[in-house]
Image: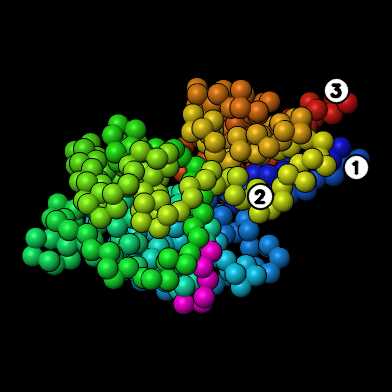
Amino acid sequence: MNVLILMDSFKGSLSSLDAGLIIKSVVEKNPSDTATVLPVADGGEGTINSLKDIENAKIVEVDVHNPLMKHHTAKYLIVDDKFAIMEMSESSGLTLIKDNLDPMHATTFGVGDMIKDALDKNIREFIIGIGGSATNDGGMGMLKNLGVKFLDKNAEEIPDGPIGIENLDEIDLSNMDKRLLECKFQIACDVDNPLCGKNGSSYVYGPQKGASKEQVEKLDLLLAKYHEKTKEVILNASDSTPGVGAAGGLGYAFKNYLNADLKPGIEIILDMLNAEKLIENSDLIITGEGKMDFQTSMGKTPVGIAKLAKKHDKKVIAFCGVCDNNATNVNVKGIDAFFPILNDCISYDMAMEQKTSEENLYRCADQVFRLINLWR
């Protein structure tokens, strides 16, 4: 049996490659079986690592500002000296300030640092994953870095972060970097939220970025004001296009200010990795991620892989760290069976330890393949 393993990371405990290699070791206990590991990601953390072995790809390191404007080294890929692959989490990610979350002041300014560095290297094509953000500023920080001016009534620039929108009176595009007109942006986005409202970026994702209930309500109102001001300079600006609410509204900035295409991240990644050909030549597909829930069924990595696998009538098994009661939605999206790896009531910190995750994933995968072997 030829098994293809396309695991996303178990965030905080196992990388996509580590998880894949553990399952490979189980599969190949049967001498007649072979397994191929292809790490994948959907645009969030791990995307660069998943794609670093692409032919003619090189890693670039650049000094950027983190979400609270502290200096930080980020990395991205340049492929064929032609296009850049970036993940916003390298500069504006949740993990960079996980002990000091501040959704009212966190900014995407650092994303602009990365883009400007690539522009200086004569790059004009971009693939940017926007998962895992610590920000809720509608992409204003990035745009400010690229030359857009957000001004108050005194024609002074407003403070960084969504808190500054309180004083926003005018948006000035006249100094926007002209090189952006030559650029093509593909944005890897795994959610379809609008900018505002109960299903918007603030209400759905604000709490995980540290926002209280009161701050969530305020953030939503601030982004609504930002949209109204944007429409004064971009008449056809949309706050309801699926995905503009991603990464605290960074999707909104890319779509409306930079004319970007928003696509499911996993589709972009699988296409780049030529995964369809590998799937077509495999007998069984293994995928998975840290937590399997309703969001998984909405098009995250495992379901994106399953969709492609079902195009070729392949069976799909998934492993996850944990799941909730909504996880069964993935069964109607192409995952034939999924298996959470936890087997005991242990603390969150213990469950997230790498050694614990390794042991749990190995044990669970071993039992699954014992069952598979019984019926062969």
Left or right of residue 344, residue 156 in this image? left
The amino acid type of the residue labelled 1 equals: Pro
Residue 170 quadrant: bottom left
Question: Distance of mark 1 from mark 2, alpha carbons?
Answer: 31 Å
Residue 31 numbered mark, or none: 1
Residue 271 numbered mark, or none: 2
Residue 375 numbered mark, or none: 3
What residue appears at the point 51 percent right and 54 percent down from the top-left corner?
A: 186
- Residue 14: x and y in percent read 59, 49
The amino acid type of the residue labelled 3 equals: Trp
Element type at marker 2?
A: helix
What residue appears at the point 45 percent right and 53 percent down from the top-left corner?
A: 260
Residue 284 quadrant: top right
Residue 59 seen anywhere in this rendered image of the structure:
yes
Residue 69 seen anywhere in this rendered image of the structure:
no
The stretch in magenta equals: 120-125
